[in-house]
Amino acid sequence: MEISLILLSLALVIILMLYFSPLVIYRIKRKKVIVRHLSVEGKEEKIILYLKEEDPLWRVIKMNKDGKNVSQS
């Protein structure tokens, strides 16, 4: 009885790993970027983006972080 429960739980874990592995790989290949926007009233809005390093927006964010002017590149 115990062996069947162990095998069942092992099969369930393997199925869940196969199901969620594309999501994990997708997340690992991207960088998390938090964009903060201040409105006129002073409210702060946060937007979370997951970007690849080849993404054009990633280049703009990286240059802004480094303190360079984006139009100079």
Image: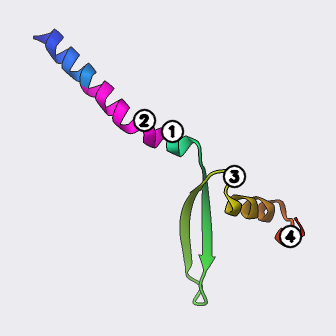
Please state if 49 lies on the left or on the right of 71 as rendered: left
Name the quadrant of the N terminus.
Answer: top left
Q: Main secondary structure of the magenta part?
A: helix
Given the current orientation, which residue lies at the most extreme right position? 72
| Separation (CA) of disc 3 from disc 4 | 19 Å
Please state if 27 lies on the left or on the right of 31 as rendered: left
Write down the residue under mark 4: 69
Q: Which residues are magenta?
A: 12-24
Question: Within 10 Å of the Cα at label 3, are there few (<14), some (14-19), or many (20+) other Cα atoms?
Answer: few
- Residue 54: assigned label: 3
Q: Does the segment drawn in magenta span residue 22?
A: yes
Q: Cβ–Cβ below 8 Å for labels 2 and 3?
A: no
Mark whose residue sits in front, 3 or 4 = 3
Write down the residue under mark 1: 25
Q: Cβ–Cβ below 8 Å for labels 2 and 1?
A: yes
Q: Does the segment drawn in magenta span residue 33?
A: no
Mark 4 or 1, nearer chain start:
1
Residue at 29% over, 29% down: 15
